[in-house]
């Protein structure tokens, strides 16, 4: 079995299942938000704020944020390991992959912290 240090779960099947699960969460959240916007054409701040004061909406939103990070990480890792290879880029391929994934990780930590701050007001 081939594993890589930057893989999300060290298993291709687990990564595939996780990415499909996160895609379903993202699709469900999109349908929910679009449906809410369509059903509330005169949406104002008070109504929007009331929606996000519900515990289940906050949890769903947090699950969606985590799904975005996991889905993106797996997708980026797959693209980088498939296309940024030593065959085409020499010995720099590994360094490029590590740098890109490191930047992505930092951006996503900031994204999650800001998201938790926005949704939970901590």
Image (tube, grey):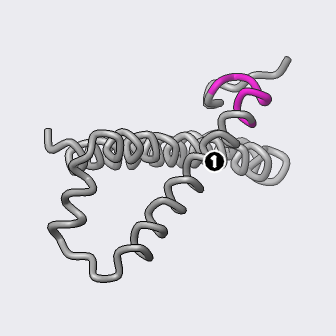
Which residue ends up furthest to the bottom in the rendered image? 42
Q: Nearer the viewer, residue 90 or 20?
A: 20
Which residue ends up furthest to the top in the rendered image? 1
Q: Nearer the viewer, residue 91 or 48?
A: 48
- Residue at 85 percent across and 47 percent down: it is 87
Secondary structure found at label 1: helix
User: How many marks do you count on the picture?
Assistant: 1
- Residue at 37 percent across and 42 percent down: it is 62
Q: Position of residue 26 (x, y in %)?
A: 55, 52
In the image, is 122 to the left or to the right of 86? left
Q: Position of residue 99 (x, y in %)?
A: 52, 45
14 above or below 36? above
Answer whether residue 12 is magenta in the image.
Answer: yes
Which residue ends up furthest to the front in the rendered image? 39
**Picture quarter containing residue 122?**
top left
Residue segment shown in magenta = 9-16
Disc 1 crowd rating (10 Å Cα; few below 14, some 14-19, many 20+) is some
- Residue at 34 percent across and 49 percent down: it is 111
Placement of the N terminus among the 4 image quadrants: top right
Q: Position of residue 105 (x, y in %)?
A: 45, 41
In the image, is 6 to the left or to the right of 90? left
In the image, is 66 to the left or to the right of 92? left
**Picture quarter containing residue 47?**
bottom left
Residue under numbered circle 1: 24
- Residue at 69 percent across and 48 percent down: it is 80
Main SS of residues in magenta: helix
């Amino acid at each position: 079995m081939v594993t890589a240090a930057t893989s999300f779960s060290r298993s291709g099947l687990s990564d595939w299942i996780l990415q499909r699960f996160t895609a379903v969460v993202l699709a469900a959240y999109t349908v929910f938000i679009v449906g809410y916007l369509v059903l509330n054409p005169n949406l104002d701040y008070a109504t929007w704020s009331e929606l996000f004061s519900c515990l289940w909406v906050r949890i769903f939103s947090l699950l969606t944020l985590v799904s975005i990070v996991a889905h993106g990480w797996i997708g980026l890792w797959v693209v980088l390991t498939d296309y940024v290879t030593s065959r085409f880029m020499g010995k720099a391929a590994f360094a490029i992959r590590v740098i890109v994934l490191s930047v992505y990780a930092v951006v996503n930590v900031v994204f999650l912290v800001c998201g938790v701050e926005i949704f939970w007001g901590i």
